[in-house]
Amino acid sequence: SDVDRAKRFYSEQAGFAVDLDTQIGDGMRLVQLTPPGSGCSIHLSAGILNMPPGVLEGLVLVVSDIEAARAELVERGVEVGQVVHRTDGAWVEGRGGRWNSFVFFSDPDGNGWVLQERPAGE
């Protein structure tokens, strides 16, 4: 809903690199950001897409150390949940086994993100 606010959140709080911030036409702006160490990027835009703000869920960032990644987001002022995992169909606080440790957070528009820990060596 507010490209400047979202850009600040992703760059200053989530730690994404700002790759591009450009006006591509009258009332059309594109901001591309890349998470640390990722080969994939996201883009924020105004005047380009007709998608309402805050409708994305389950955007996954895979990290090597879930607790360190969570601590960094907390230090940067992001409101994040505790480390959780799934056991017997329920969310349980604490780390789980292989590919089963998660942290959830949302951006200022309510788009839902998930940190997931990758097992060492995979």
Image (tube, helix red, strand yellow):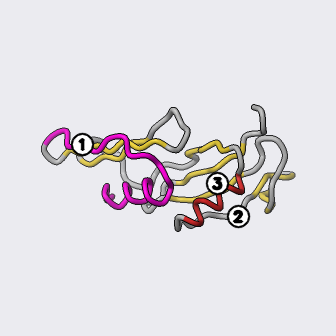
Given residues 26 and 118, the one toward you in this image is 118
Sequence order check, earlier mark of 3 and 1: 1
Residue found 75% across the figure and 50% down from its top? 101
Three-letter residue code for mark 2 = Gln
The residue indicated by pointer 2 is: 82
Count residues near mark 3 (Cα–Cα under 10 Å), then give few for <14, some for 14-19, many for 20+.
Answer: some
Percent x, y of residue 116? 68, 46
Cα distance in 3D space between marks 3 and 2: 12 Å
Displayed quadrant of residue 121: top right
Cα distance in 3D space between marks 3 and 1: 29 Å
Residue found 73% across the figure and 59% down from its top? 83
Mark 1 secondary-structure assignment? strand
Mark 2 secondary-structure assignment? loop
The label shown at residue 85 is none
Cα distance in 3D space between marks 1 and 2: 36 Å
Three-letter residue code for mark 1 = Thr
The residue indicated by pointer 3 is: 69
Asked if the magenta segment contains residue 23, the reply would be yes
Sequence order check, earlier mark of 3 and 2: 3
Residue found 46% across the figure and 51% down from its top? 55
The residue indicated by pointer 1 is: 22
Magenta segment, which residues? 1-25
In this rendering, would 80 be left or right of 6?
A: right
Count residues near mark 1 (Cα–Cα under 10 Å), then give few for <14, some for 14-19, many for 20+.
Answer: few
Does 84 appear above or below 45?
below
Does 38 appear above or below 13?
above
Percent x, y of residue 108? 44, 62
